[in-house]
Image (cartoon, rainbow, N blue to C red):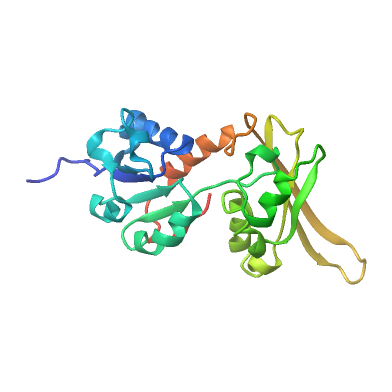
Amino acid sequence: MAAKAGFRKPRRIGIIGFGHLGQYLTTMIEDEGHQHGLELAFVWNRSREKMDGKVRRELQLEFLSESMQRSADLIVEVAHPQIAQEYGEEILKHADFMALKVTMTKHPDSFKLEGSLQEQKESGSSQRTVLYEGPVRQLCPLAPNNVNTMAAAAMAGHNLGFDQVQGCLVADPSLLDWHVVDIEVDGPVDESSGHQFTVKSTRRNPSSWGAVTGAATYASFWSSVLKCKGHGGKLVLC
């Protein structure tokens, strides 16, 4: 049967993770996806019962290993960095893959930390505290849910990489309504004048107290889904 003139096959989107972001993206695709040529391929969550009554049964994926059978064009991971580590290579064989998180200076309760950083946070402080300052490589395993902005910068700045890009993680108990990220870029020092080119930007993302994800991040994820149209198996950083 010949396709109708002008008909375009919808891009099928798979969602890995059904926390706040996963729920938001699922709702947006179900409610507005048809306007953008998108349809939901599947939703997976470690606790499947969390999807009951919110995701149609036929779209619930029981085992993540079955995602390849759902013919997704784009798979969005909003679960845990371990998912990308375990399944990212296999997923990229079948679909575009986005690993999407935002790291900011936050209230201590907004951090999900490991090892020594978690112990340092639990020790408690009523003052603004620098939890870590140093190469991004050492920070990544200690704050896997909170360092994606830094990791993306390390990948984008390929001439510096994870060992030379510096990360600074700050816990601020007074930061009740915002997540803040500061990015500073230093150029080479001019030998004749001793001056150095520097660019600094600050982003303040509204956030409720204790939330891991800032309010503006939801719309950012949705915009990224709409713009991701075939990247040849590349990892998309947002």
183 above or below 36?
below
Say which residue appears at 32% left-offset and 51% top-offset: 73
Locate residue 156, reporting x and y percent.
60, 61
- The image quarter containing residue 49 is top left
The outermost residue toward the right is 193
Left or right of 219? Residue 110 is: right
Say which residue appears at 39% left-offset and 59% top-offset: 87
Locate residue 143, reporting x and y percent.
62, 53
38 above or below 97?
above
- Along the line of sight, the residue nearer the viewer: 198 or 207: 207
- The image quarter containing residue 157 is bottom right
Count of all numbered marks drawn on residues in the image: 0
- Along the line of sight, the residue nearer the viewer: 171 or 38: 171
- Residue 29 appears in the picture as rendered: no
Left or right of 75? Residue 3 is: left
Say which residue appears at 34% left-offset and 56% top-offset: 95
The outermost residue toward the left is 1
- Along the line of sight, the residue nearer the viewer: 92 or 131: 131
- Residue 112 appears in the picture as rendered: yes
Locate residue 114, reporting x and y percent.
62, 53
31 above or below 99?
above
Left or right of 146? Residue 87 is: left
Locate residue 151, reporting x and y percent.
60, 58
Say which residue appears at 78% left-offset and 49% top-offset: 130
